[in-house]
Amino acid sequence: MGPKNFDHITAKIADTRAKQAALLESNLAMSRLRVSAISFLNTVPLMWDFEHGPAGADFEISYTLPSSCAAQLLAGSVDIGIIPAAAYAQIPDLAIVPGVAIGARGPVRSILLVSQVPVEKIQTIALDTSSMTSAALTKVLFERWLGPGKTYTPMAPDLDRMLRHQDACLVIGDRALEVDRAKHLTLDLAEEWIRLTGKPFVFAFWAVRRAALANAPSDLAAIFQASRDHGTRPESIDSIARNWAGRVGLSAAEVRTYLTENIHYQLDPGCLEGLQLFYRYAAECGALPPAPALQFMEIEKVCHYLA
C-alpha cells in the first residue's frame, strides 16, 4: 500500500469516527430530558445536583421566570418544570414529582403585597407578571377575607412604577427580598394565608409532561429528591449564602435564614392539604379554573444519586 492510499484510508477512518461521535452526541442530546427551573434564590437548593453533582449531564437545564416555566411546559418545549402551583390547574396531562416543593409554613418574605394605603382601603392592585400562583393567592385573600371587588392590573415588576399607578402591588422572588419593608406597608402573603387557614402554602413543585415519561429514567423522582436533600445540607446552604448574598442585597446570614426558615422544601401531607384548599378557594372565586386531582409519578426505585 502506497503512502497516498494509507493517508486516504487514515483520513476516511478519522472522518467516520468524527461522524459517529457527532451522531452519538446528537442522540444523547435528544434523549436528555429538558428541564426548566426558576431563576430565583429559593430554587437554588433544588438544583444542587444538576449544578454540582452527576445529574447535570443527564438533563438539558434552562432557567426562567415562574410564568415562563409554565408556558414552556404547556408548549411542550420542555419536559419537566418546577411549575407555579397555579399552572397545574391550567396545563393538562402532568404528573407531579412527589415529595419536593417550594412552600412555606410561616412568613416566606419573598411574596409581598406592598401598599401605599392601609389594606382595608386598597382598591387597585398591580400584579407582578412573572407570577401566577401569587397573583391567584392575592385574589383569593382579597375575595375571601380582605375585601372583594378590587381592580387587578398585570405589570412588570418595577416597584416604583407599580405604586405610581396603583394603590398596592404584588412583588415576588428576589425582588421582594430587596424591598425595604421599613419604608412600605407590606403584607407577607404566605403568612396571611397561614393565619387565615391554618395550612401551609405551596408555591411551586416539579411536574413532568406525561408524554415525556416514556423516555424518563425509572428513578426520576429519586434524582430530584436527592438533589433537594443535597442542596439543603448545611454546607450547601452555606455555599449558596456566600454566592448569592451580593446578588439579592442580603447578608449571607440573611440568605441562610431565608432558605432554612422561610422556605419549606417538602411536599408533605400538610402542604398537600394546603395546596388542595388553595385550588378549591381559587376556583370558587374565579382566580383559577378547577384543578384536576393531584396525580403523582410513581417511584420505582431508589437511584445511585442518593448515595
Image (spheres, rainbow, N blue to C red):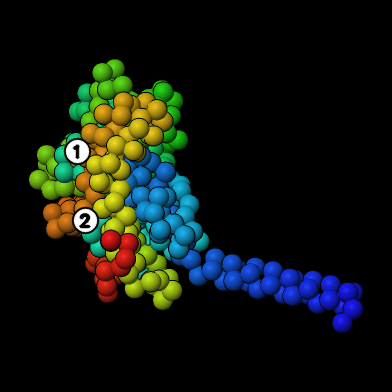
Location of residue 192 in the rendering, given as x and y in whole percent from the top left corner: 17, 37
> Is 20 left or right of 210, judged from the image as shown?
right
Q: Marks 2 and 1, Cα distance to the nearest angstrom?
A: 16 Å
Location of residue 263 in the rendering, given as x and y in whole percent from the top left corner: 24, 42
Give the answer, above or below, for where 277 lies relative to 76. above
Which residue: 65% across, 73% down? 20
> Is 140 left or right of 80, judged from the image as shown?
left
Answer whether residue 74 is visible to the viewer in this image. no
> Is 283 left or right of 79, judged from the image as shown?
left
Please report whichever mark, 2 or 1, sits nearer to the chain's N-terminal start: 1
How many residues crowd around disc 1 within 10 Å: few (fewer than 14), some, or many (20 or more)?
Answer: some
Q: Which residue is mark 1?
A: 261
Q: Which residue is mark 2?
A: 267
How many residues crowd around disc 2 within 10 Å: few (fewer than 14), some, or many (20 or more)?
Answer: many
Location of residue 246 in the rendering, given as x and y in whole percent from the top left corner: 40, 27
Q: Relative to the observer, which residue lies in front, 274 or 145?
A: 274
